[in-house]
Amino acid sequence: MLKLPYGIADFASLRRDGYVYVDRTAHIRTMEELGRALLFVRPRRFGKSLWLHTLSTYYDVRLREEHPRLFGDLEAGRDPTPLAHRYFTLEWNFSNIDPLGGGSGDPVMGIGELLEDYVNATIEAFVSDYRGVLEEPVRVEKNVVRSFENLLAAIRQTPYKLYLLIDEYDNFANEILIGDEPTYRRLVSADGPFKRLMKQVKAATEGRGVERLFLTGVTPLVLSDLTSGLNIAKNVSLEEDLNALCGFTGTEVRELIGRILAERRGRGEASVAAEEALEMMRTWYNGYRFARPATEGATFDTLAAVYNPTLTLYFLDHLRRKGTYPRQMLDTNLAADENKLRFLGREAGGGDVLAEMVQTGEHLEVERIEERFTLSEMLTQASQNKTALGSFLFYFGMLTIEGETDWRWLRLAPPNLVVRKLYVEQTLRQLLEGDRSVPDLSSPARSLMLDGDIEPLLDLIEEKLFQRFSARDKRWHNELAVKTAFMALLFLDVNYRLFSEPAIEGAAPLGLGHGFADLVLLLRPDARSTPFSDLLLEFKVVKPEALGADTARLDLPSRDSLAQLAPVAAALDDAAAQARRYRAGLLARYGDTLRLRAWAVVAIGFRRLVAREVV
């Protein structure tokens, strides 16, 4: 039976126990050629730890005899580099450090103590692991800098050098940054414990025992804020050759789906169709691109977009066991990124950027992805230059490289439906922030999806969201704000795939070219047996002053009377005409599989909503 390594980051265990491994070991040679001190960042849960453990296993002098077993059928086994198993390897994983400082009154002092205790513990374990190779005893002291010096002194008495691998170097610092910026600044300052340790690491690479250094993290921001603390690490995260180092390509996902379904057929178990499963995964998980083409003849079309590996294995594990799709497409292990979105909503104009992208579906254009930028640069330059903010969102996996403009700037966009869902949910939280009563958000949506009754949803938006929009700044405007409200309330991923501004062939006026529907919700393949409908909504806005003397009628409860007013009726007719074209295009593409219901929706300012089903 196919063993999928969901949640497994230990390369040696993965290989010894027969789990599926998609070979990435050819990149070991690439990294050796890139330099001796490297920083490699990717979004959370993107396979960085597995790669770090791969390097640790490959270079560890203790595992020389196991090389054929661990690497024999891989590229690094067929063509090993001269440096294989030539190092002591020491791993630090800073996700083990409590960002709250263990409850200490002074979080920076508390973090410093935890950091010293943790690093000392790894040194003690190292001495135990290499006791047959180290010739000198190593004294572990309270002062971790002295402990590290003692270790290096012992290593210098051997024929070997140290390869130091630091996993999630920015983990606790990022958590502090999001919740307590002043504490973060103290942590990375000249006299902070983190910077002191990193300065010692830097010094150790200058002929004192550390020959190679590899760091993983989420962004280069913390390293930049450390300034001279560790300015020797080369950021290789944007290298074209490393674009697919972490994550799965479309070809690899297709092959894994095929193997899973073949096994299920062999056992006589029912399952979904391969192409249907691939389309689900492509919609929800694909789309990450971490480099721009640099090789002659390469284009964005030839540079593979990759699937998030944690989500891919989450999906495939469910498919292997059940033959169906997970009800929740977002693995709860990734939900913590919502905290980053809250931070960006508060700081650096991030709320403006997120709101605009949620509403319009357009790209963010930046000159480049910054390889180094500080917190101050991100906060102070965002209003004039979105490059640092766009880079921050890119490194966290909230945006990815979609292409280039004619003037060779990068176009950044949300990579897939999982990320768009995070955006939409964050928008809804912002709109309802401070509301003491918790409204029922699901029943009005179900009324529309099940019964075709849109009135409860209109009531909810008028009563709970319009007052929030009207109090907001210019980011909430026109039909885009109305669409955002509907998106936030209708995005139920258990049943639907949601598309904002999808291109629909033949839906432009006169049937020429593409048209762009405002909002389309298509049932997931596994929800086709439910009584829910596919939905198409087209939005228009009428300014209240356009009603003239009829403005007073906005306070009347009847929407039917509002729909009879000339400006509103004209807007409804216009929206209905567009919806008919988009409906025809969708039916032409998907055929009888759709149970499509279409609606024209008109907002009268941020006061009232009127809707008409399009027949």
Image: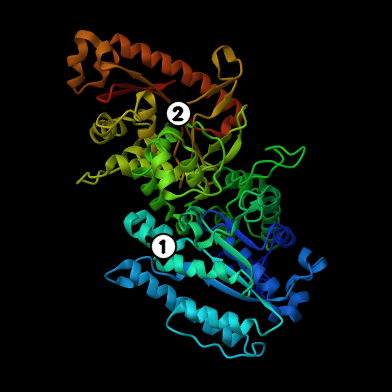
Q: In front: 473, or 107?
A: 107
What percent of the width, then of the height, locates residue 91? 57, 73
Asked where in the image residue 304 lies, by quadrant, the reply is top right
Q: In front: 414, or 499?
A: 414
Which residue was labeled with disc 2? 597
Determine whether, in the image, residue 443 is placed left or right of residue 216: left
Asked where in the image residue 614 lies, by quadrant, the reply is top left
Image height of 396 relative to 560, above or below: below
Q: Which disc number belongs to residue 563?
A: none
What percent of the width, then of the height, locates residue 470? 26, 29
**Element under label 2?**
strand
* Marks 2,1: beta carbons within 8 A: no
Asked where in the image residue 275 lies, by quadrant, the reply is top right
Image height of 130 relative to 86, above or below: below
Considering only order in the chain, which callout, 1 or 2, is on the residue closer to the N terminus?
Answer: 1
Which amino acid type corresponds to the residue marked 2 in the rendered image?
Arg
Label 2, label 1: how far apart the Cα atoms are: 62 Å
Image height of 369 relative to 92, above or below: above
- Can residue 88 be seen at all in this image of the molecule? yes
Image height of 164 relative to 153, above or below: above
- Can residue 442 be seen at all in this image of the molecule? no
Circle 2 or circle 1, nearest the eye? 1
Q: In front: 231, or 341?
A: 231
Determine whether, in the image, residue 502 is placed left or right of residue 16: left
Task: Indicate the quadrant containing the C terminus: top left, top right, bottom left or bottom right.
Answer: top left
Which residue was labeled with disc 1? 190
What percent of the width, then of the height, locates residue 204? 58, 72
Q: Residues within 10 Å of mark 1 (few under 14, many from 20)?
A: some
